[in-house]
Amino acid sequence: MFEHFFSPESVAVIGASREKGKVGHDILKNLINFSYKGKIYPVNPHAESILGIKTYANLKSINDRIDLAVIVVPARQVLDVVNECIEKGTDSIIVISAGFKESGIEGAAIERELYQKIKEHSIRMLGPNCLGLIDTRSSLNVSFAADMPAKGNIAFFSQSGAICTSILDWAVSECIGFSKFISMGNKTDIDEVDLIKVMCEDDHTKVVLGYLEGVKNGVEFINAAKALTREKPVILVKSGGTSAGARAASSHTGTLAGSENALDAACKQSGILRAMTIEELFDYARIFSQQPLPKGPRIALITNAGGPGIIAADAVERSQLKMASFSRNTIDTLRSFLPSIANVYNPVDVLGDAKEDRYKFVIEKVIEDPNTDIVLIILTPQAMTEIEKTAEVISEISSKTDKTIVTSFMGGKRIESGLKIMCQKKVPNYTFPERAITAVEAMYKYTLWQKKQPPEIKKFNIIKDKALSIIANTKQNLRRYISEEDAKQVIAAYGFRIPASILAASETEAAEAAEKIGYPVVLKISSPDILHKSDFGGVIVDIKNSNEVQRSFCDIIQKTRRLMPGADIKGVLVQQMITGGKEVILGMSRDPQFGPLLMFGLGGIYTEILKDVSFRIAPIGLSEAEEMIKEIRSFPLLTGVRGEKPADINTLLNDILKLSQMVTDLPDIVEIDINPLIIFPEGSGTIALDARITIS
């Protein structure tokens, strides 16, 4: 279906203009100037020819099939043109025109009508409000960009036309080539999922870049990206995330979630590398396009200045890379060649007076070392430095090895000539060594993803009907929040261990319940209208006798009626008091794009303050649950410190997987907190002290 977008035999530009500087003029000019081989049909009822090509009043008057229609008319006229495309049998259109949903209510209404029209007639549409499209293999440039990129192996798609033009300009100066270049605009029809699928089948694309402001269908996005990233790296940058979480949320998880964390989790689970800045996107694009993937994490640093070498080594230590340990033979060879004051270990300091022959010898010997996977060559311009010759040497060596070579020629004007040489020979250079390390690390992370086995989803024996019954009863009573005692029964139905508890309607019943459970006990107000009980004293702990139980019961009821007079009070929950262990939190917030977003982190009352949490999108497998646990900063506390026994990680992993199964099984659950979940030492399990569930 997409061949008419990327290799059409005929293109009509509806709204072609005679006037220079008009979008309809520039698109037609790009088709002509960049040697598109197919037939070009300008459409303009007020012109006989434009740029020397016969012009037609409308599509009907063209006596030929039109594979691709590029529409550059005012928004109000687009529907009329689409009707002409339908009559003509054209199945692929690009709507460059603006004035749709980005312009307000009236434009949004036109866009909805446009979408209904193309869907009804099986037409695929790029845009509206887009820059257009470029395919270098077919020499097709149906955009109003000022340049045509060189042929290359990078495909790029973007919601922003301005980002497109910036990247095109950058690419020219960096000797970067593209296979495809696509501006999605409003994404009314064709979106990132469609384009990811296209890139998967494109033999000319090695690397896929994208700029997004949002994702339309999160589940399809993840599935499509998983298929692509097994074969090709995908690097995305997304804007507009800082206010994404500013919605009403009743749970800790809901407060902490937000679409940024959902997208971050989606990227981790689908192998996408997420660039946090446009600069980082450029950095990653350069190295993935120009160098082979590293076979391992071991990096060798070669420098003519000690300071930058130390800075680079520090950056390596902060990354997932490792400093290569040279073999004895390599060390002896370097020592026999280099001046006596040179450092022959990693980083290798070839000294400030190093010329191209010294660089050449050291680089070749370090690359030959079986303990080296990656080489970073740092050069600072000294008076005797042979910048151009050294650049030539590095380029020659890079062309002959399958190991990853990256450089950091530091400076400005003096190194320009060397940079041009390496640019043309596809050796990526970074102004500072830290950026080079970050780019190489991204490559290494991608190799780990390629080796990672798809997760196996574990299924537990559960009592689903019990959970469904509780949810149904809550809905029947027109409530959004399941009571604490019922919420605990829901998670118990999915295999969570919960403390013994009894709901009491009077102080006498509370005392009897405490005797049955055994002291000490905890008393909690029971009301579906009150979620955060401890905020106003609705929880009393460590109650040791009957008199305390009765007094505490009366205190809680009176305080609740005074502070929350409209609350529906069911009574007081008398609960077994649990001591020891460590507090963690499990939760889920259902993201509108990606679905159930699981959360794990440090538990208790400080969850939202410390924000020491990790996220994944359910369903997940064991390896992803392990990653969630290890990602939090406080993970070492669970492994046992200062003589403490390690926590029962195996039970915790199963709890995360049970939660994953629960929120996948029960789509009515919108938010859930299990907080705190007490995790005991190894072999002693976990217990959920509190649970809050919000339903749709």
Image (tube, grey):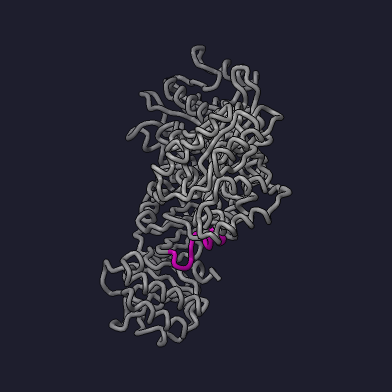
Above or below — where is 462 with respect to 557? below
Q: Position of residue 357 (x, y in %)?
A: 50, 26
Q: Where is residue 570 in the image (x, y as percent from the top left)?
A: 53, 48
Query: Magenta residues, as a range?
Result: 187-199
Viewer-proximal residue, 526 or 160?
526
Q: Quadrant of residue 320?
A: top right
How many marks are shown on the rendered structure?
Answer: 0
Q: Residue at x 28, y 83 (%)?
A: 46
Q: Where is residue 602 in the image (x, y as percent from the top left)?
A: 53, 34
User: For the view shown, which residue lies furthest in the front direction?
Assistant: 508
Q: Position of residue 14 (x, y in %)?
A: 37, 77
Q: Residue at x 61, y 34 (%)?
A: 514
Q: Does the segment drawn in magenta span residue 195?
A: yes
Asked if residue 189 lies left or right of residue 619, the reply is left
Q: Does the segment drawn in magenta span residue 601?
A: no
Q: What predominant SS class does the magenta segment belong to?
A: helix
Specify whether residue 345 is in view: yes
Q: Residue at x 46, y 29 (%)?
A: 378
Above or below — where is 380 with respect to 64? above
Viewer-proximal residue, 666 or 504?
504
